[in-house]
Image (cartoon, rainbow, N blue to C red):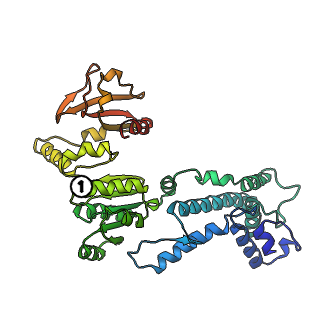
Amino acid sequence: MGMSAQSATGFSTVVIGDLDDASRLAMIGAMLVGGSVGSTAGGFKLLRLLRLQQLVLARAAAPRHAVIDVRLGGRRVDDEDLWRAMLLMVTFALLVFLSWLAFVAHGYPALDALFEAVSATGTVGLSSGITRPDLEPLLNGHTMLQYIGRTRGYLCAAGGALPGYLVRQAIGGTMRAMFVGAGSLAVMTARRLLKRGHEVVMIDCDKARIDALAEELDCGFLHGDGSKPVLLREADPSKTDFLFCLTGNDQTNILASLAGHSLGYRRVVPKIDDPEFEHLCIELGLEDAIIPARTTGRYLADMFEGRDHMEIIALVKDAARVFFFVAHEEDGKPINELDLPQDSRVMFLYRDEKFMLSEPESTFKRGDEVMTITHSRNIEKLHQRWSA
């Protein structure tokens, strides 16, 4: 009977209702797990359970600061695989729970109701005796669970086509940040991310610095040159949501960012101290480059003059977004001929570090730093146009 339950064969040689509670619970567990991926058996599949089990065991056995590398059959198991497996199992369990509630609400015994709900969702075909021709009309809808289970409709509900980071966000999962450089800015940011429950890995050339930080930060550490592709590859781009390049050297940060881009890191943020490198970063596709010294300088100058630097940020609400780009040679035309997406406006620009309000007839020049306000749906299109 256990084999019949796990393989969704539906073959029975005994009356399920005559079995004791322990036997029925064992069969419920077998129906929940199901068969192997690729089989016609229901459940959330053995492989997904093994993936999650291996991750839990690896984390329990590893040192506190270890970077976990989960493998199954010699293949690296990415975080996206693990999160999708977890979300699918949660969605499957939710369908079972809702069906079970309906049966219990109609007065059926809790264990029999659970057996019926799991069997239907897992498309097993076994029954504890509840399913019958004269079943209450409302409860007959539980047969729809068999259709959902057979067509794997819950895979769509579980975000099977979503990127991994969206899946993690959907269920409140942690994200992973990689830091090249363990300076004060990196450490301060890492502390905040760790406090919010995210995973952090730091790369630094200074072994003594790593040893000191390991005593106070509960994160992973790698010793070496973070601008070298071999080390960045070892840090696993497929598992990482952000790569922050925050060493004290602009050229190292730019090289590390370019290497990260080529290795497939989803988002790369280089820090530069010399504003002369800003245009180079944008032309290289490193549009998320930050210049902390300039940002701090503007903040302090505004504070000195009694200005509220947060005013413009507070005004950007709902679907409004701010987009910044550097004008190319082909952008040398009046603003009203720029063919911006709908619901987009140029607010102002900087030319040779001088602030200029934009007018419809204003003509861009190569190197102008342009600030626009736009709808959130346009951000990707604008990035493709000016970040290439």
Classify the position of the C terminus by image quarter: top left
- The vertical placement of 303 against 210, above or below, is above
* Left or right of 111 in this view: 233: left
* Left or right of 188 in this view: 76: right
* Left or right of 208 in this view: 238: right
**Residue 169: percent from the left, percent from the top?**
48, 55
- Location of mark 1 (residue): 251
- Which residue occupies the foreground of this view, 215 or 222? 222
- Which residue occupies the foreground of this view, 275 or 216? 275
**Residue 308: percent from the left, percent from the top?**
19, 42
Among the 4 quarters of the image, the one containing residue 367: top left
Give, as a three-letter code, the residue at label 1: Gln
Crowding at mark 1 (Cα within 10 Å: few <14, some 14-19, many 20+): some
SS of the residue under disc 1: helix
- Which residue occupies the foreground of this view, 163 or 352? 352
The extreme left residue here reads: 304
Q: Residue at x 19, y 45 (%)?
A: 276
- Disc count in the image? 1
**Residue 303: percent from the left, percent from the top?**
14, 45
Among the 4 quarters of the image, the one containing residue 21: bottom right
**Residue 279: percent from the left, percent from the top?**
25, 42
- The vertical placement of 311 against 135, above or below, is above
- The vertical placement of 131 against 360, above or below, is below
Classify the position of the N terminus by image quarter: bottom right
Q: Residue at x 57, y 73 (%)?
A: 53
